[in-house]
Image (cartoon, helix red, strand yellow):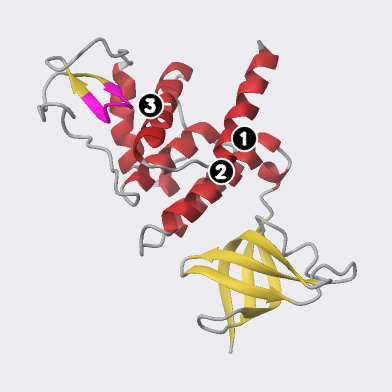
Amino acid sequence: MIREIEGLIIKEIPYGETSKIIHVYTNEGLIGIMCKKAKSLKSPFRATTLKFTYGRFNIYYKENKLSTLVSVDIINPLSTIKNDIVLLSYVNYLTELTEQVIKQTPDNLYADYMATILKINAGLEPLIMCNILEIKYLDYLGVGLNLDSCVSCGGKAAIITIDGDKGGYICSNCYQNEFIVEKKTIELLRMYYYVDIKSITKLKISAKVRDEINNFLNTYYERYTGLYLKSKNFLQKLTSDLCQKKD
């Protein structure tokens, strides 16, 4: 049976001398596809079965087995991402993160994952889009943020800052010399969590607020998720090196 599926190639695995297996992330989950002779120079699949190809894949579908590729129609070449090492590094990280989160939940994360990548390709700030997806993934990892009250006393009044090590909001009564963030930083954490990624058309967030949210999430992920991803380390080093060159 031939089926058409929409998805993004997130992994390529060599198979023999001329073929490969691709893993395509779709709204039905991950689907493994055999691409016969895709590595051959004259193969029409050579260019359309590379990692981060976003398209419609016509396949001989086999449930719970490797399907076989028939043809590929590109939906979006994602040229902006593929021509920028920083953007590509963000997508590599988000893909590795998504693969880890998939292991923890039966829910399909494709819609938010793909929407984030398309927004980055369209020119939206990659760090902000990355942080939005990171916040949404925390629930699936079993360490969702408490965005309604102080993490220490449970009080809902007089929230004055956030702290990654302590795990969230801190009120004035429980404050113990933690770094005080901007009021907008506290407000935007909720927005990041609840926003529909597809609906985002522009982002007007100051560099200070953007960095405070990112620093909070970096600390929170390290403290509570147990995830240590090579792609995240590479991304942090790359962006740090680029900032130093600018300075």
Nearest to the eye among marks 1 and 2: give it.
1
Q: Residue at x 71, y 47 (%)?
A: 79
Instruction: Answer with mark 3 or mark 2, whichever residue precedes in sequence.
Output: 2
Amino acid type at mark 2 = Tyr
Residue on which disc 1 sits: 234
Q: Secondary structure at mark 1?
A: helix
- Quadrant of the image for the C terminus? top right
In the image, residue 60 above or below residue 193: below
Q: Secondary structure at mark 3?
A: helix
Amino acid type at mark 3 = Phe
Residue on which disc 2 sits: 93
In this rendered view, identify the residue nearer to me: 231 or 203: 231
Instruction: State the image quarter where residue 156 is shown.
Output: top left
| Total tally of numbered discs in the picture | 3
Would you say 109 lies left or right of 164 here? right
In the image, residue 99 above or below residue 168: below
What whole-number distance in Å separates the C-alpha atoms at marks 3 and 2?
18 Å
- Residue 198 percent location from the top left of the image: 44, 49
Instruction: Answer with mark 1 or mark 3, whichever residue precedes in sequence.
Output: 3
Callout 3: 10 Å neighbours few (<14), some, many (20+)? many
What whole-number distance in Å separates the C-alpha atoms at marks 1 and 2?
9 Å
In the rendering, which numbered label is found on residue 216? 3
Q: Which residues are magenta?
A: 162-169
Callout 1: 10 Å neighbours few (<14), some, many (20+)? some
Amino acid type at mark 1 = Phe
Q: Residue at x 54, y 49 (%)?
A: 96
Q: Residue at x 68, y 76 (%)?
A: 34
Q: Is residue 163 magenta?
A: yes
Q: Dots 1 and 2: beta carbons under 8 Å? A: yes
In this rendered view, identify the residue nearer to me: 128 or 18: 18
Instruction: Answer with mark 1 or mark 2, whichever residue precedes in sequence.
Output: 2
Q: Residue at x 18, y 29 (%)?
A: 151
